[in-house]
Amino acid sequence: MVCTKRGTMLIRCQGKELLIENALCIDNVPNLLSVNQLVAKGFVLVFDKESVGVFASKDDVLVDKPFIQLERKMGNKLWTMEQPLEPVITSQ
């Protein structure tokens, strides 16, 4: 696998937008998000047997209002988006 692009990625998912810096893009590979990068941006992740919720704050966790919800569909360690990501690399 060869990284074909690197830069700031604008992710559009479920009607919301999220900027991820230093993103790497590999052609023909599903999009992967770093838990560490999401946490560093202030997001809270809640995992259970069937899904992971990405919440914008601890308050959103308390009222069960995820920023995005991911369902586990690829084995025990990977989750996929309910809706496809629309990544846009803004620099290379």
Image (cartoon, grey):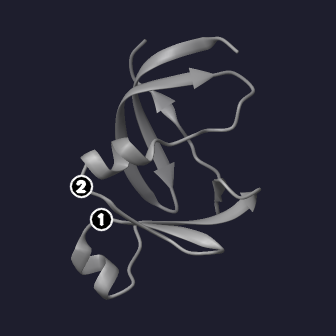
Count every numbered label the image shows and give the total. Answer: 2
**Contact, CB < 8 Å: mark 2 with mark 1?**
yes
Q: Type of residue at label 2?
A: Gly
Residue 49: image location, x then y, percent: 63, 75
| Image quadrant containing the C terminus | top left
Q: Is residue 24 left or right of residue 65?
A: right
Name the residue tied to disc 2.
Answer: 42
- As rendered, which of 85 and 61 lies closer to the eye? 61
Type of the residue with mark 1: Ala
Extreme residue toward the bottom, this view: 63
Residue 50 placement (x, y as % from top left): 66, 74
In the image, is 36 to the left or to the right of 51?
left
Gap between marks 2 and 1, in whole Å?
A: 7 Å
**10 Å neighbourhood of mark 1: few (<14), some, or many (≥20)?**
some
Q: Residue at x 65, y 11 (%)?
A: 2
Q: What's the mark number on residue 56?
A: 1
Residue depicted at x 39% and y 16%: 91
SS category of the residue bearing label 1: loop
Residue 18 percent coordinates (x, y) = 37, 48
Label 2 Cα crowd, 10 Å radius (few <14 / some 14-19 / many 20+) = few
Quadrant where the image shows the N terminus: top right
Say which quarter of the image contains residue 37. top left
Q: Nearer the viewer, residue 70 or 88?
A: 70
Q: Earlier in the sequence, mark 2 or mark 1?
A: 2
Q: Residue at x 36, y 49 (%)?
A: 38
Q: Position of residue 60 (x, y in %)?
A: 29, 78
SS assignment at label 2: loop
Q: Nearer the viewer, mark 2 or mark 1?
A: 2
The circle drawn on residue 71 is: none
On screen, 66 above or below 34?
below
For residue 59, what is the image quadrant?
A: bottom left
